[in-house]
Image (cartoon, rainbow, N blue to C red):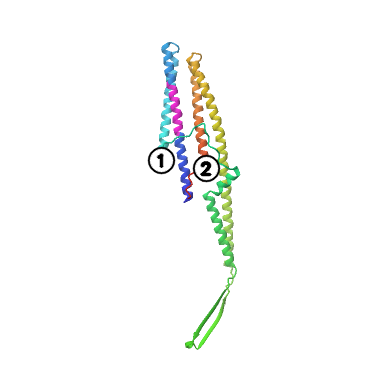
Amino acid sequence: AQDARHETARQLLALWFAALRAGQARQAAQGNADAAAELARITERRLRAGDAARLEAELATAEQARMQAALAGAVAAQTSTRADLCARYPDLCLLIITASDAATLPILPSGSETQLRLRYIEHSHEYLLAQSEEALALHQAHRMDIERRPDPTVGVFATSERGGSERIAGVSISLPLGSVHRQSQAAAALADAAAALSRRLAVERRLGAEFDVLWSQLNGRRTAATAQARAAELQRSAADRAMRAYRAGETGLAELLSAHRVLADAVLAERMTHIDTLESDSRLRLDLHEIWDFDD
């Protein structure tokens, strides 16, 4: 039952972050659409003032339409993921799914990597089940080994006959003889215990590998998120300079559109890597039973 609740929590976590990721993509698309609309207005004003060619106005309008199409696709994707989440967990439909500040990354769980791996394994329901099955198999093997040896029974009895004129007292001893059947049962139980030990060790190795993947994934995504945040910051600065140069007539629209497209990709990558980092951190903490621990 605990393992089933844990797996349900994993599914909920995946659906939640899918909806969160779709929401961040829509926000990025909305920002791109707003920037494209502002660029189209600036180009239209320059066209009326005679500072821009008709071709530039058409390019700006086409860029605005492209961003609006991308925004429509992002809204549809967000609606789809939200509907999937609400269909499985209706109570969550009333919640507003938002992400924390993109500049803030979660702090790593406390403890060394070795300590965290040990906690990850020891808190796993699958490992606890394999451990219990091993203990039960060892107990049964011990019991069968005891049954293989004779277990004598000593009894005392007393009786009377002929209306009490005769009294009888005695002692009985029962000594069962061991058999090949009991020996084979003990050998089978010992083999079952060895198999249970092997299963437990296999589960331990697999869970250790799972932790290594989650841990390396979290650290890798944290590094990527930091790098993407820096890249987005630099690209925003470059796009601002390109806009000022375009307003002053120092560059053409093609250069400005190129800068805005690179900025759009950088902003989206920044948002996605941040959400990926949050998801990896939450998944690891969930498996460490630091969040949503329903066992109690």
Name the residue tied to disc 2.
285
Q: Residue furthest top?
A: 50
Name the residue tied to disc 1.
92
> Residue 230's spot in the image, x, y percent?
55, 28
**Residue range of the region highlighted in magenta in the rendering:** 22-37
Circle 2 crowding by C-alpha within 10 Å: few under 14, some 14–19, many from 20: some
Above or below: residue 280 compared with residue 65: below
2 and 137: which is toward the camera: 2
Find out whether residue 253 is within the magenta segment.
no
SS for dot 1: helix
At label 2, the amino acid type is Arg
237 and 200: which is toward the camera: 237
At label 1, the amino acid type is Leu
Find out whether residue 32 is within the magenta segment.
yes
Circle 1 crowding by C-alpha within 10 Å: few under 14, some 14–19, many from 20: some
SS for dot 2: helix
The chief SS type of the magenta part is helix
Q: Quadrant of residue 190?
A: bottom right
Q: Are marks 2 and 1 in contact (CB under 8 Å)?
A: no
Q: Quadrant of residue 53?
A: top left
Can residue 2 be seen? yes
Earlier-in-chain disc, 2 versus 1: 1
> Residue 292's spot in the image, x, y percent?
48, 45
